[in-house]
């Protein structure tokens, strides 16, 4: 029987990666400017930037995660355990139009975005979401394509939802440390996917954005 809670327990690769990231983070604290040239703070793919959360007092500029407007399709997304597109989405029109559909996550359902490049310029992400049942929650992980470990998921938090569409809090991508690790190993920008798992109840998500600025 599938257990959403059990599936969130860190695996051995996750623990290894977490230890590696912690070690590098400690090194960064002492290395300071000596590592500055190894970390890129420029947006890595030239994506169009907008201010979708400005009505909610967030003036940061964001790029839309590929395929996450769910406008009738979800190109590049992996949907499992009942996750699917349903009619109706966030009503605010932050992408330039009101969403015609959104991503539905039943209890235990999982959706993972396509991989997109991140670096130290992409430290956070947020999205729009709502619940369809009492006490619905969605667990969020960032999935890195590690040069040494392969695809490795790192849990970053849980979204506590309300019955009405609303923006979530910001979640960290760990891109600052990850950019240094990947840069040292392969000399390229790290690739990250975002994974959403409905832990309790059913939920809907829409319009996932990555904040592309290290400093504001």
Image (cartoon, rainbow, N blue to C red):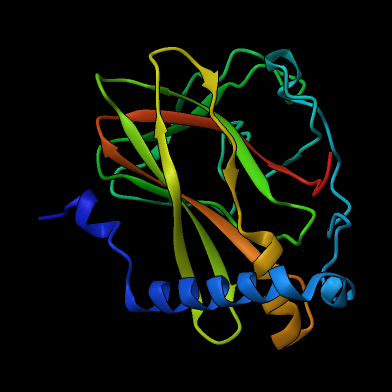
Vertical placement of residue 104 versus 155, above or below = above
Q: Quadrant of the C terminus?
A: top right
Pinpoint residue 61: horizontal percent, then vertical percent.
81, 34
- Dividing the picture into quadrants, the one containing residue 24 is bottom right
Number of callouts = 0
Which of the image's four quarters has the N terminus?
Answer: bottom left
Where is 63 relative to 163, above or below? below
Q: Percent x, y for residue 11? A: 32, 72
Image side of residue 9 versus residue 128, left or right? left
Res. 120 image quadrant: bottom right
Q: Residue furthest front?
A: 30
Determine the residue positioned at 65% across, 69% down: 178
Q: Nearer the viewer, residue 27 or 194?
A: 27
Residue 149 appears in the picture as rendered: yes
Query: Of 138 and 20, which appears nearest the observer?
Result: 20
Query: x, y percentage for residue 182?
Result: 69, 78
Identify which residue, 142 or 41, lies in the foreground: 41
At 85% from the left and 65% from the top, the residue drawn is 40
187 to 121, vertically: above or below: below
> Residue 173 location, x and y as percent?
61, 54
Q: Tell me the residue at 86%/77% (across/down).
A: 34
Q: Is residue 168 left or right of residue 178?
A: left
Q: Is residue 16 left or right of residue 136?
A: right
Question: Is residue 66 visible in this depiction of the protein?
Answer: no
Which is nearer the eye, 210 or 64?
A: 210
Query: Furthest-left residue in view?
Result: 1
Query: Which residue does the image show at 72% across and 60% down from the upper left?
Result: 118
């Amino acid at each position: 029987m599938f257990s959403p809670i059990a599936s969130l327990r860190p695996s051995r690769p996750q623990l290894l990666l977490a230890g590696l990231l912690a070690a590098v983070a400690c090194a960064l604290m002492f290395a300071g400017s000596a590592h500055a040239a190894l970390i890129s703070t420029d947006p890595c793919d030239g994506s169009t930037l907008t201010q979708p959360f400005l009505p909610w007092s967030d003036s940061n500029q964001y790029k839309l995660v590929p395929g996450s407007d769910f406008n009738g399709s979800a190109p590049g997304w992996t949907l499992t355990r009942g996750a699917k597109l349903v009619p109706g989405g966030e009503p605010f029109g932050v992408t330039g139009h009101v969403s015609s559909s959104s991503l539905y996550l039943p209890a235990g359902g999982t959706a993972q975005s396509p991989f997109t490049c991140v670096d130290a310029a992409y430290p956070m992400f947020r999205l729009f979401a709502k619940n369809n049942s009492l006490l619905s929650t969605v667990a969020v992980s960032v999935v890195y394509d590690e040069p040494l470990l392969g695809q490795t998921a790192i849990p970053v938090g849980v979204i506590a939802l309300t019955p009405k569409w609303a923006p979530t809090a910001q979640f960290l991508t760990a891109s600052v440390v990850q950019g240094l690790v990947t840069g040292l190993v392969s000399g390229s920008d790290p690739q990250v996917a975002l994974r959403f798992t409905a832990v309790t109840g059913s939920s809907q998500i829409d319009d996932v954005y990555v904040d592309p600025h290290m400093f504001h």
